[in-house]
Image (tube, rainbow, N blue to C red):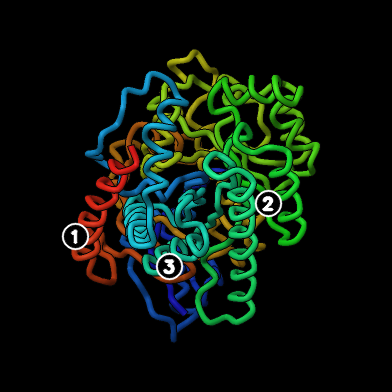
Amino acid sequence: MLILKNATLVQFEPASVSEGQDIAIEGALIKEVGSHLSARYPQAAVKEMQGKLVMPGIVCAHNHFYSGLARGIMANIKPSPDFISTLKNLWWRLDRALDEESLYYSGLICSLEAIKSGCTAVIDHHASPNYIRGSLNTLRQGFLKAGLRGMTCYETTDRNGGLRELREGVEENIDFANQIDAAKTGGRVPYLVEAHIGAHAPFTVPDEGLSMLAEALRATGRGLHIHAAEDRYDVSHSHDKYGLDLIERLDKFGLIDEKTLVAHGLYLSDKDIEIINRHRAFLVHNPRSNMNNHVGYNQRLGGYNHLALGTDGIGADMFEEMKFAFFKHRDAGGPLWPDSFLRFLHAGNELLARNFGAQFGRLQAGYKADFTICDYASPTPLVAENIGGHLAFGMSANSVHSVMVEGRMVYEARQFPFEVESIYAEASRSAMRLWQRMDALS
């Protein structure tokens, strides 16, 4: 047993702040929260927190770890005046250039940087058309090496190889889900990584692909993770080719349920939003990515019953993402205040709970011991009513001191428990080779 002693406990939903508290951890779970627990459990190891903030783990609810080696990219990228040309000239060339080595280092670097930014979990959405089979396990190895909790899936699409590519994508999703089930049964490694069933935006998934995805959901018991309405083209394509709104079309195939994660959704209709809410599905908002891709702003955030925050591949700094989400909303004339965005940040834990079958996001007995620990010296009172304001205007990833996942410190006093310099050096070499392969594809 381990006791975190003399901590300031900060919960997001419902909001609360409690000073001078201890947390007793047994295995992967919180055993008890209270005062003077070391006297109650005299055999436990004790870590003195000295008043540091201990918060439920922060979750990045939508990311693309395959983009981890794109930072500062030096490749011949043609001018891309719109979103579709950006996909074709940059991201769809990058994912085709990925091989096993570059994907491993991309995923591992993203996992390490997510932890440094205070994330305990990341929900990933993957693509590597020339390395499909086995790609999700390669990503899983990076999660496990870093100690990060997460989920991943392969984005099923026909954009490169038609029906064959659709089948290979669905098969990789099913194989990975089965591998996770076997790992849970065997218990040989920590149960840190789960599976979604992935799909790219509906404009690259014909009805044959949706049928395959529906069967994959039934066969594995998992939920769908899909991009939708990131750009107006996705919506107009669905109306033109299928005569249906985007989510209405997915729902026709039985693809929307409480485990479903819909990323972006900038241009979803009233009917689409009603379907998402009725099925208790999640919409994940990615404000920095939307700004970077110049696709517009989601004016309907307040209309969703279940909304979380992600980055869509722009790192995993959720302090930064929450700030952008709030400031962009205010800039667009929105009515929501920081407390709403605090709830959105917290909501990623509910996504984990639905898919892992465990309790996340509260500092109380029986919940997973996934914590983000910060040393934050505030010049003003920190109380339940203003936690959102402190995150929006004060705290940052620089405040992150330690991160605990599954009851284990994976990052402590701003240090990993293993040497990382050589990982970064090899990742840099792998990035150069990746960029060269991209140029060969142009």
Sequence-first disc among 3 and 2: 3
* 303 left or right, relative to 426: right
For disc 1, the marked residue is 425
Distance from Cα at disc 1 to Cα at disc 3: 18 Å
For disc 2, the marked residue is 223
Q: Residue at x 59, y 53 (%)?
A: 169
For disc 3, the marked residue is 141
- Residue 311: x %, y % from top left: 44, 39
Residue 94, above or below 419: above
Residue 232 occupies quadrant: top right
Quick one: SS at disc 3?
A: helix
Q: Please state which amino acid type lies under the numbered disc 3.
A: Gln
Q: Residue at x 25, y 56 (%)?
A: 430
Q: Residues within 10 Å of mark 1 (few under 14, many from 20)?
A: few
Q: Please state which amino acid type lies under the numbered disc 2.
A: Gly
Distance from Cα at disc 3 to Cα at disc 2: 22 Å
Residue 300, above or below 310: above
Residue nearest the viewer, comparing 434 with 63? 434
Sequence-first disc among 1 and 3: 3
Q: Quadrant of the C terminus?
A: top left
Mark yes or no: residue 139 visible: yes
Q: Please state which amino acid type lies under the numbered disc 1.
A: Ala
Q: Residues within 10 Å of mark 3 (few under 14, many from 20)?
A: some
